[in-house]
Image (cartoon, helix red, strand yellow):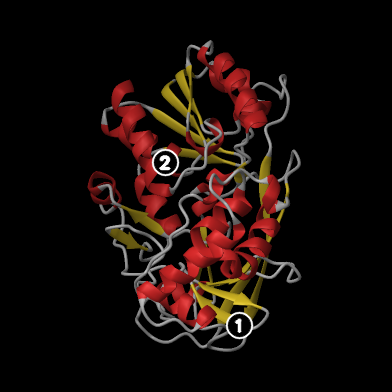
Amino acid sequence: MYDYIIVGAGLYGAVCAHEAKKAGKKVLVIDRRSTIAGNVYTEKIEGIHVHKYGAHIFHTNNKKVWEYVNQFTEFNRFTNSPVANYKGELYSLPFNMYTFNKMWGVVTPKEAEEKIQEQRSKAGITEPKNLEEQAISLVGTDIYEKLVKGYTEKQWGRDCAELPAFIIKRLPVRLTFDNNYFNALYQGIPIGGYTKMVENMLEGIEVRLGIDYLKEKEYFDAMAEKVIYTGPIDAYFNYSLGILEYRSVRFDTEVLDMPNFQGNAAVNYTDRETPWTRIIEHKWFEFGKDENGEDLSKTVISREYSSEWNVGDEPYYPVNDEKNGALYQKYQALAENEKNVIFGGRLGEYKYYDMDAVINSALEMIGAEL
C-alpha cells in the first residue's frame, strides 16, 4: 500500500516524508505520541509557544539546511544569550569578557588570559583525563567551581571527575564581549512555533498518531516496501543485547500572572544545591510579543530537572561513553541485517544531534535512497 512507512513524526521523519512525497512516493507517517514534531513540539499557552520537551533554538552554518527549513517557516532573529545564576550571582554565558570581569574584575582580554593561565598552571594539568581537568584547563578553577561543576553534575548525575573530557571540549570561551552562545551564521526560532513548521513539512501526507509501531510491527511491515525507523534502536530489537543508557529530563511548567519572571529565555542554575538545572521563560524566544506584536501580560516558565533514564521514560541525551558505544555497535550490526528497514535520527543512531544535523542527515539519507 505504501512505498515508505516512517516511524516517528519528528524532524528526521518529517524531512524524509516530505522528500519521498515530492519524489512521487506513497508515504504513511506514524507516531506513538498524540502530537507531531517529536521533541521540538511547541504548544500554545496564553498566546506563548511553549517548548514542551525543552528549549530548541535553531542554529546552523549549513546554508543548504537553512534554505531548506525556510521553505516551511519564517524565522525570527532570536540570539541565544543564556545567564548563569550561582547562588544569586549572575554571570554571562558563554564565558566571555563580561563573565571574566564579574568573576575577577579584569578589564582586558590580556588580563583574562593571564588569570586563566595562572589557575591552569596552579592546577598542574597538562593532559586532561576527565571533564573536571578539561574544564579547569579551559577556564580556570574559579569558573569551573562556580559555573561548570554543579550544573554538569546535575545534568549527568555523575561526578565531573568521572565524566569523559570530550563532553566539554566544545565549551565556548571568548576573550571578547560577544555573548551569542552559538558560533552560527544562521539562528532563530520559527515564527508560529516548531509544530507549525513540521505541519508544513507533512502537508498532504497521511499521518496516524497514537500508534505504537513495535506493538503492531508485522501489520505495518506488511503494508510497505520499506520502513524508516526513528525510534530507539535497542527497543526495535526488544533490548535483546542490553539497554542503551540515556539521561532524561523532567519539566515543571507553570503559567504566572506577571509579564516578566526572569528577563531572559534561559537562566542556568549552576550551584549543586538548586535541584533544577535551568529555568526557561518561553515568551522571550519571541521577544515577549504575541502574533500581532502586542506585549503579553502573562508568562510561562519551565523548570528542568535532569534524571536517570529508565525504560518507559522519554530518552533525551545518549550516554556516549565506551560501554554504551560498544553496545550500540552491536545493535548497528543487527540493524544492517534488516534489509527493508532504515534506522535514522537521534534515537535510531544513538547520537546527540543538533537540529540542523538531524535535517542534514535525513536529506542525505533520503536523497541517496530516492
Q: In the picture, residue 111 is in which quadrant?
A: bottom left
Q: Position of residue 252 (x, y in %)?
A: 69, 67
157 relative to 261, above or below: above
Residue at the location (62% across, 69% down)? 302
Residue 236 seen from this side: no
Could you tell which of marks 1 and 2 lies nearer the N-terminus? 1
Which residue is labeled 1 in the image? Answer: 89
Q: Amino acid at mark 2?
A: Val
User: Where does the image place residue 82, in percent across and percent down from the top left?
Assistant: 49, 71
Vertical placement of 9 versus 170: above or below?
above
Would you say the residues marked 1 and 2 are in contact, meaning their CB atoms lie under 8 Å apart?
no
Which residue is tagged 2? 358
Give the residue drawn at x 32%, y 57%: 184
Tell me the crowding category of disc 1: few under 14, some 14 to 19, or many 20 or more residues within 10 angstroms, Cα based: few
What residue sits 34% from the left and 28% below the top? 366
Choose between 149 and 10: the one closer to the eye.
149
Q: Which of the 4 quarters of the picture holds residue 164?
A: top right
Secondary structure at badge 2 equals helix
Closest to the observer: 72 or 303? Answer: 303
Q: Nearer the viewer, residue 17 or 273?
A: 273
Judge whether 15 appears above or below 170 on screen: above
**As drawn, is 88 to the left or to the right of 102?**
right
Q: Nearer the viewer, mark 1 or mark 2?
A: 1
In percent of width and height, residue 65 lies at 29, 46
